Image: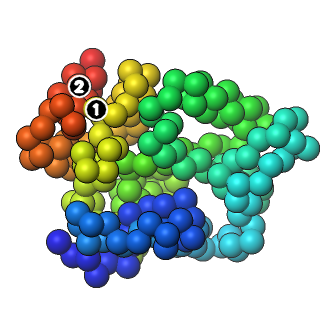
Amino acid sequence: MNTNNKWGFLRETREKAAKAGIDKATGLHRTGLEDYLKVIFPGVKENEWIHDKADSKTFGKNIRPDYRCDKLMLIIEFDGVQHYKQPDTIIKDKENQKLYEDHGYKVVRIPYFIQLTNEVVKTMFGVDVKDPLFDPTIPSMASSGRNTPAYCCSAGLKRMMEDFKKYPQQYKVNMDALKKENNEFLTGWKMLKKEFEK
């Protein structure tokens, strides 16, 4: 596996990426979202991204989008594993997304199991990045990380499948990796497959 790639597993910030360190299973480092944003939106300065700051003036309530760019009228939410485990979090995400959209923002949600490959960036943001981004052959899920479908609530599993349908290459790479683990109890790959086929 190529661990010299500039792009590592996505984390919400550089700080969180540095704190997470090297992934033990793959030897791959982590990369903060702001580093990806510089390449995806080269015309937007880093200080034009507002990260995790409450804005009751704009939204009428104390709400904290992960990343907001008023220049692009874009909000990016980084959805970690808890956004697939907790039904109340899933409901809150839907409510917040509607609120953002009602205020004219486009909302892009980045699920924890989707990495920013060139294909994903094109689908997610409508941007063609010429240089290679994250290696699309590296899976994001493993039972050792406790981030597989087996750890999701039923609403989270459904949400995961909706996300995977947008990024079929990421679905295939992760399904193949989960099947190889040969532990349905901890991977839940059969549940995911069943949800995909609905």
Q: Residues within 10 Å of mark 1 (few under 14, many from 20)?
A: many
Q: Nearer the viewer, mark 2 or mark 1?
A: 1
Near-viewer residue (42 or 143): 143
As helix, strand or loop, the secondary structure at mark 1 comes to helix
Q: Residue furthest bottom?
A: 4
Three-letter amino acid code at the position of disc 1 = Ala
Residue at 8%, 41% (x, y): give it.
182
Q: Residues within 10 Å of mark 2 (few under 14, many from 20)?
A: some
Residue 74 percent coordinates (x, y): 67, 51
Quarter of the rendering containing residue 134: bottom left
As helix, strand or loop, the secondary structure at mark 2 comes to helix
Residue at 53%, 65% (x, y): give it.
16
Residue at 43%, 56% (x, y): give it.
122
Three-letter amino acid code at the position of disc 2 = Met
Give the mark, 2 or 1, whose residue is nearer the N terminus: 1
State the quadrant of the C terminus.
top left
Where is 173 relative to 148, above or below? below
Question: Label 2 to label 1, Cα distance in Å?
Answer: 8 Å
Q: Which mark is residue 150?
A: 1
Residue 63 percent coordinates (x, y): 77, 41
Residue 36 percent coordinates (x, y): 51, 68
Residue 177 percent coordinates (x, y): 16, 49
Where is 23 relative to 99, above or below? below
How many numbered circles does the render carry?
2
Q: Which mark is residue 191?
A: 2
Near-viewer residue (28 or 146): 146
Q: Looking at the image, do the residues carrying marks 2 and 1 touch, with CB atoms under 8 Å apart?
A: yes
Quarter of the rendering containing residue 106: top right
